[in-house]
Image (spheres, helix red, strand yellow):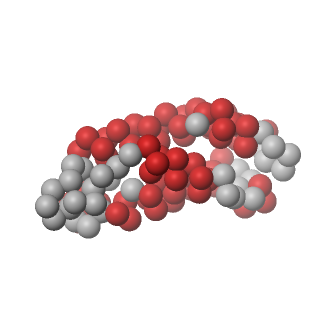
Amino acid sequence: FTTILSGFLSQDGFSKDLKELAAPIVNSSISIYERVQHDMLPTPMKSHYTFNLRDLSKVFQGVLMVLPKHIPAKDDVLRLWVHEESRVFRDRLIDEDDRITF
């Protein structure tokens, strides 16, 4: 994921300093994925709480769909990444306590 994201952020149109965000974003995404997978286990009421690497790839798929003009600065990239993390993981959580934990 780091190679894919850094290659994407290296394309023409993106600010040169955005590429350095690739590794921290990927590492943080993996940490969130591992934490969600470990802490939010499926139960009879939460049987859809099954998280796999496809969910992690959906985060990056969403990030890779953006046009350079929409993320001119580091804060914009981070905001997009937080949005995608929330879209993929938080939106599936049905319990307010789980959302707060996320």
Res. 76 visible in picture: yes
Q: Position of residue 2 (x, y in %)?
A: 61, 33
Q: Where is residue 37 in the image (x, y as percent from the top left)?
A: 30, 44
In the displayed structure, 49 sits above or below 16; it is below
Q: Where is residue 95 in the image (x, y as percent from the top left)?
A: 22, 65
Give the total number of marks visible in the rendering: 0
57 with respect to 34 (left or right) = right
Q: Which residue is drawn at 67% across and 58% down?
A: 65
Q: Quadrant of residue 79?
A: bottom right
61 with respect to 101 (left or right) = right
Q: In which quarter of the image is residue 62?
A: bottom right
Q: Residue at x 66, y 52 (%)?
A: 64
| Near-viewer residue (20 or 47) | 47
24 with respect to 4 (left or right) = left
Res. 78 visible in picture: no
In the rendered image, which quarter contains the N terminus? top right
Q: Position of residue 101 (x, y in %)?
A: 26, 53
In the displayed structure, 62 sits above or below 52; it is below
Identity of the residue furthest to the right in this view: 12
Q: Residue at x 20, y 61 (%)?
A: 46
